[in-house]
Image (tube, rainbow, N blue to C red):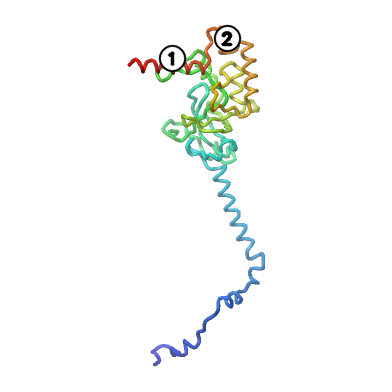
Amino acid sequence: MVWPFTSASKKDDESSRHSVAWDESLNGTDWEHYKDPRNWVPTLLVTTTVLASLQLYRSYLRRIPGATYIQPAFFRKRSLFGRVTSVGDGDNFHMYHTPGGRLAGWGWLRRVPTKKTQLRNMTIPIRIAGIDAPENAHFGRPAQPGATDALAWLSSYILGRQVRAKIYKRDQYDRIVATVFVRRFLLRRDVGLEMLKRGLATVYEAKIGAEYGGLEEKYKAAERKAKEKKRGIWGAEPEFFESPRDYKTRMSADDSKSNNTK
């Protein structure tokens, strides 16, 4: 029976269909279309460009808001570029990561926040590698001689400036240990080395976990020279000198005694 408004019967429709083998369908594909580079090269170029751009962004242009966001694979292989937003002690500070610098728009298209509320949880704490500056007063402990001078000098030298940090590891306080460089009068300066030259810090003395970035001997030579010229902390009488490491050891021992007597 032919249904109304149809032009062919079911029998005729079924007779017009026939199964096609899979290999025959492949043979029926017009492969000549794909042999012409004009049909696939543009797609390949666009795909490759998109994937390369994503990789470039993830590796070099994505802003890192804090120390915990730094991938372990970055340590000893990468450096971070950013602006110093605060200096907390003579050997550590906070940096706002600005990947790509001015080429990525920082300073003219993108602005670094200046308010404390905007900077909260958005900066990377940096511990300058290879040096130990005198301790400031904190946790109820008195300031060590030379601490004020070290803090004042470091603040004047890097605060508000762009620095590059060659990163090595994350320490027990979630700070990133790094050799820090800053441009002064068009010359790139190693901040830690400059502090040693001025007698504002000692070479880091810890036997375990010390990081020097391959500069230990250079740092020790700068320390010896400052010591010979009695610069900074080396100007005091030797019998009254106490290194930052010895100071922290003494303070920890005093704290332990105080806790035991309670």
Q: Is residue 128 left or right of residue 122?
A: right
x, y percentage for residue 21? Answer: 55, 79
Q: Which quadrant: the N terminus?
A: bottom left
Mark 2 neighbour class, 10 Å CA radius: few under 14, some 14 to 19, many 20 or more: some
x, y percentage for residue 185? Answer: 64, 25
- The number of numbered badges drawn on the structure is 2
Q: Is residue 221 left or right of residue 200?
A: right
Label 1's element?
loop
Give the residue type at disc 2: Gly
Furthest toward the front, the residue is 260
Q: Looking at the rendering, which quadrant does residue 31 occupy?
A: bottom right
Q: Nearer the viewer, residue 239 or 31?
A: 239
x, y percentage for residue 53? Answer: 58, 49
Q: Is residue 72 left or right of residue 115?
A: right
Mark 1 neighbour class, 10 Å CA radius: few under 14, some 14 to 19, many 20 or more: few
Furthest toward the left, the residue is 262
Question: Which residue is located at x 53 percent, y 15 percent?
Answer: 243
Label 2's element?
helix
x, y percentage for residue 9? Answer: 44, 90
Question: Which residue is located at x 60 percent, y 12 percent?
Answer: 231
Q: Nearer the viewer, residue 105 or 16?
A: 16
Question: Which residue is located at x 64 percent, y 19 percent?
Answer: 222
Furthest toward the right, the residue is 36
Give the residue type at disc 1: Pro
Q: Looking at the rendering, which quadrant does residue 137 occupy?
A: top left
Q: Which quadrant: the C terminus?
A: top left
Q: Looking at the rendering, which quadrant does residue 207 occupy?
A: top right
Marks 1 and 2, the one that precedes in the sequence: 1
Which circle marks residue 108 in the picture?
A: none
Instruction: Give the residue pinned by disc 2.
Output: 235
Instruction: Give the residue pinned by disc 1.
Output: 142
Question: Which residue is located at x 61 percent, y 76 percent?
Answer: 27
